Image: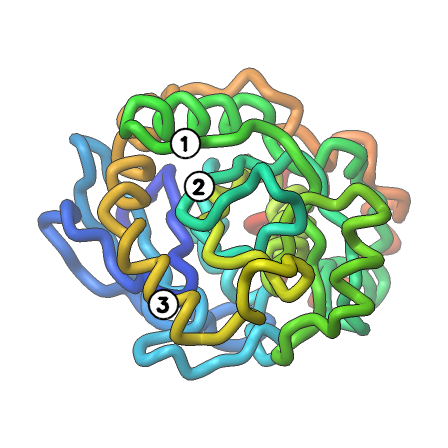
Amino acid sequence: MSERVQIGIIGGSGLYDMAELTEREERKVSTPFGDPSDPYVIGTLRGKRVAFLARHGAGHRFTPTELNYRANIFGFKSIGAEFILSASAVGSLQERYVPQHLVIPDQFFDRTKGRASTFFGNGLVAHVAFAHPVCGLLGAVAHDASRKAGATVHRGGTYVCMEGPQFSTLAESKLYRSWGMDIIGMTNLQEAKLAREAEICYATVALVTDYDCWHPDHASVTVDMIIENLVANAKTAQQVIADAVSRLPYARTCECASALQHAILTRPDAVPDRVKKDLAPIIGRYMS
C-alpha cells in the first residue's frame, strides 16, 4: 500500500520546486478525471512527508484554462492529503499591496468562464458551504509563517479569479478596484472549491508581482515583470511554505474535515455504482 501523505503543496508560476525537500520520489496518480499536471513529488520537509505539484507542469506547459483542476485535487486526496498550501503569483488591485509583498486572501470572486469546478454530477448531487472558502486554521498558519520569514504580509482580502490567459484590460482593472477587490490571479478559485468538496483544508500564499495595469506610475504587467519579482521573492516563499508545514497539526479541528457531512442530497441507494467507485476517496465514508 502506498504511503499516505497529509500535506500537499501547489507551486505556481516561478515556483516549480521546493529546495528543502529531501528523500524525494515521484508518484504518478491516475484519477477518474484524467491526469494531474505532473507526477507528485513526495518528500520530507521539516520532518513531515509532503507532496509537491507544479501547477502548470514541468516547463510551464498548461494555461490556467487548460489546467485539470479536478485531477490535481483528486490526486492529492487519493494520496491522503488533508492540507493544501498553494503558492500563486497575483497582481495587486490596491496601493497597499506592493510587489514582493505576500497576501493570505480569505475570499474569492469568480470571473472565470465555465471551468469544471465540482466533482459532483452524473447522478450525485452535493452542495458544500463556501461562504468562507479559505481554511481559517491554515490561513493563520500561513500568515504566521510569513511574518516569521520577515515578509511584509497582509492577512485577508479578496482574490479575483479571472479567466486569462490575457491580463486585464484597463477598464476591467478599474472596475475590480471599484468593487473593492484586492488581488487578481487566474487559478486559485477552482482549487479552493474542489478542495472544499474533497474535505481538504486550503489556503493561498499569494505573491504580489505587479500592479495589474491600473496604476498610473507603473507599467502594465508583463511576464518579464512577473518573473523578476517572483525570483526576488522565491526564497521567502519557500521559507514561508516550509515553516507553515512545520506548524501544521496532525489532527484537524476545522469544519473543512467534514464539509460533505450535510452537503450530499442524493440518497446513497440512488447513486450510480460507477460514481460511488470513482469518488470513493471523497464520498466513501458517506455511502455506507
Q: Is residue 263 left or right of residue 283?
A: right
As rendered, which of 279 and 99 lies closer to the eye? 99
Question: Is the residue marked by circle 2 packed among few (<14), some (14-19), or many (20+) residues within 10 Å?
Answer: many
Residue located at (31% from left, 49% from top): 233
The residue wearing badge 1 is 152
- Which secondary structure, mark 1? loop
- The three-letter code of the residue at mark 3 reads Ile
State how far apart marks 3 and 1 are (Cα): 19 Å
Which label is found at residue 101? 2
**Image quadrant of residue 143?**
top left
Which residue of the protein is positioned furthest toward the front in this rendering? Answer: 217
Q: Decide: marks 3, 1 in contact (CB < 8 A)?
A: no
Quarter of the image with the C terminus in it: top right
Identify the residue shown where x is 66% and y is 50%.
93
Question: Which residue lies under the disc numbered 3?
Answer: 227
Q: Residue furthest left?
A: 23
